[in-house]
Amino acid sequence: MQEKDYTGKVESRENISLLSACYFKKLTDMNIKSELKNILKGRVTIVGVGNIMRGDDGFGPFLSECIKGKISANVIDAGLAPENHIKAIRESKPDTILIIDAADFGGDIGDVKLLEKSDIPLYGLSTHNTSLALFLSFLESDTKAKVYMLAIQPVRNEINTPLSDIIEKRCSEVESILEELLPKDDSH
């Protein structure tokens, strides 16, 4: 029997089962919380990158909007052009910068991976005009901050499609982790 997967392609039941297995895999199985705890030090700036009009590529901006004002970090929705937000990033005087984006790193659908600058190829991995590796290198040099990328393996990135269910679930999980690790200080 044939069914449609999240990309709209006709797939076999075996592939649907794989999608289901990925959906129920927890972020805790991926050690993301402990990895983030180890790197989110000092003043943190989080930069969401992506195109909300292209399905799962909107993960970065979607998550940015979800956490803005809820955590003790400067949060910037940089959309399609993170290079246009360099001044705001610089002015936040970060010790740590976390770029959040959808990227094809060869993982299972919905996998979340913390990448260092050296893990990101000079070209490829991202759907954006500016190489993220060059952008991260520039930020590191310009701000002297430690720069990382939290990447999610997308299901789809077709134009005029919403976030897939799996990616929306991961967004909620990452939001909860960030709220726990970077609690908002309401004393001011």
Image: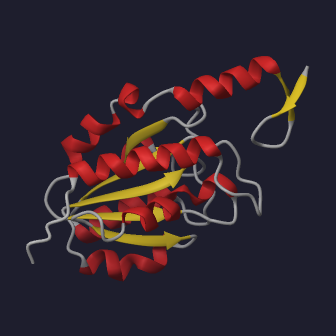
Please identify the quadrant where the C terminus is shown. Answer: bottom left
Name the side, left or right, on which 13 lies relative to 142.
right
Residue found at the very far right of the displayed protein: 1
Which of the 4 image quarters holds residue 22?
Answer: top right
Q: Residue at x 75, y 41 (%)?
A: 6
Q: Picture coordinates of residue 95 (x, y %)?
A: 18, 62
Q: Is residue 95 left or right of residue 81?
A: left
**Foreground residue among 115 and 66:** 66
Where residue 152 appears, as percent x and y from the top left, is 51, 44
| Residue at the image point whose x is 27% and y is 43% from the top | 36
Residue 107 lies, with reference to residue 75, above or below; the image says above
On the picture, is 30 further left or further right than 181?
A: right
Most distant residue in the left direction: 187
Q: Position of residue 109 (x, y in %)?
A: 60, 34
Residue drawn 63% across the image and 52% down it: 56
Which quadrant of the figure contains the N terminus?
A: top right
Would you say residue 107 is visible in this rendering?
A: no
Residue found at the far front of this picture: 186
Q: Position of residue 43 (x, y in %)?
A: 17, 65
* 166 lies above or below 157: above
When asked about the image quadrant of residue 64, the answer is: bottom left
Which one is nearer the viewer's eye here, 102 or 16?
Answer: 16
The tally of labels here is 0
Q: Is residue 173 left or right of residue 43?
A: right
Coloured how? secondary structure
At x 62% / y 66%, what residue is drawn?
Answer: 129
Q: Is residue 5 in view from this perspective? A: yes
